[in-house]
Image (cartoon, helix red, strand yellow):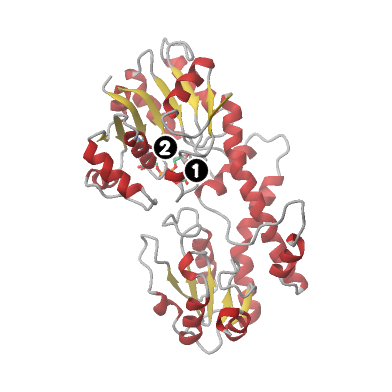
Amino acid sequence: MGFDVSVIGIGRIGLPLALSFADRGLHVLGVDVDPDRLAAVAAGRMPFEEPGAQEALERVQASGRLELTDSVAEAARAENIVITLGTPSFSHIEIDIRDVRAALDDLLPHLRPGQTIVLRSTVAPGTTEFVAGYIAKHLDLEVGEDVFVAHVPERIAAGRFFEEIDTLPCIVGGVGALSGERAAGLFDVFSAPVVQTTPVQAELAKIWTNILRYATFALPNLLMMDCEQHGANVFEVIDLINRDYPRGGIASPGLTAGTCLRKDFAFSEERSAAPGMLLAVSRVNESVPLFLVEGIKRRLGPLSGRKVAVLGLAFKADTDDERDSLAHKLIRLLERELADVAVHDPQVATPTSSFDDAVRDADAVVVATNHSVFRGPGPLARISELAAGDPLVVDPWNCFGAGQVFGYAAEVVALTPALE
Ligand SMILES: NC(=O)c1ccc[n+]([C@@H]2O[C@H](COP(=O)([O-])OP(=O)(O)OC[C@H]3O[C@@H](n4cnc5c(N)ncnc54)[C@H](O)[C@@H]3O)[C@@H](O)[C@H]2O)c1
């Protein structure tokens, strides 16, 4: 057939996977419709950050085992076709599978008996059966006998791909036993254990992995808001809850979002028999930017004409991925208060101010992303030096280690042991 595997959508998930297959000796075809992305990869340049990916790309290029195309139909030249396309949600609490359907429509005229189609994208329960049904409806082929369809969800965290591809159990939900075996055979090139299940259980396991994290962070975020209401310190309460407590513990607050966490709960909610609970979880996490803005206003008064520095645009620490980041929402809310907002993020592609320019003369500094470079006493000392008088420091992540969500710089510095 020409290729062992084609990967449709060489984005943040598809490209590291394509590189990993090629690194294991498979002949891989990478498919994408974005000419800039294809050009970057063809030139041997990673289009986004992922530790280890640049080295893998260089190795794979030297081996000649990765080829690229902008034609989805070409993907049918491979024995295995892995779909890693984006699956956003509509604003209607409903998965948007238009990209997956479009790719299937391109593939259908070229599919042949013996091929395996793996849905790697995150999907709402029932989508893998839809894909199998869509193929069966349009072709005279039986899924599970002639062609094979499986969901093999991606649960690897951004930034850990090359470590976790060989360690994190690989869930395989085949449509029929043979589909599961075929997909498991493909992912057997990696060292991670393969766990076979049904398609819907694979779908549920993936989205509930993310729902668990989304809900886990909503609890400390709600506690942070409650503490402000009661004049309590959330970090002290969290310490009281967790200290030597043998039955689990509560996580830390922060701006909880990102392209996966924010949408995957909606994939469950679209057919939930008990809707509402996860919407409340989402409401809590989505309220954090407003809570921070209101907290700044309570302390500084109206923000019109006041300078607010926002540190971090990425959705989580040490990534260049800004998609669905609450930092953007925070900035929009600050701008709606007529504040003069300055932003610094050393990781993202969006141009931002330098750290010094962002914090210089600021009345308030908000740590929106807990990047490693913001941690510890150094950045705090620089804020004290450059900002206006005794600026308000807003640190829901406790990056500076002072244990204060809102504190004036002099107080925060005094509470940070390394600066005493
Ligand atoms: N990013 C993550 O950390 C992560 C983690 C787990 C699961 N996922 C899931 O993996 C899937 C992909 O996410 P991602 O972050 O890699 O998305 P992405 O946007 O980075 O990648 C998607 C790629 O598909 C390309 N594309 C779009 N339409 C196409 C088409 N018709 N034909 C060919 N290529 C096309 C885009 O140009 C892009 O390069 C989603 O379902 C997501 O929920 C993502």
The quarter of the picture showing ligand 1: top left
- Which amino acid type is marked by label 1? Ile
- Residue lying at 43% horizontally and 32% vertically, measured from the top left: 100
- Residue lying at 41% horizontally and 79% vertically, measured from the top left: 356
Question: Disc 1 versus disc 2: distance between alpha carbons?
Answer: 16 Å
- Residue lying at 49% horizontally and 38% vertically, measured from the top left: 154
Q: Residue furthest bottom?
A: 389
Whether residue 87 is situated above or below residue 343 in the rendered picture: above
Q: Rate crowding at label 2 as few (under 14), some (14 to 19) or many (20 or more) other CA atoms within 10 Å.
A: many
- Which amino acid type is marked by label 2? Leu
Whether residue 173 is situated above or below residue 160 in the rendered picture: above
Which residue is the site of mark 2? Answer: 85
Which residue is the site of mark 1? Answer: 156
Left or right of 388 in this view: 242: right
Along the viewing direction, whichever of 239 and 346 lies nearer the viewer: 239
**Percent x, y for residue 74?**
28, 26
- Residue lying at 63% horizontally and 56% vertically, measured from the top left: 285
Mark 1 Cβ and ligand 1 under 8 Å apart:
yes
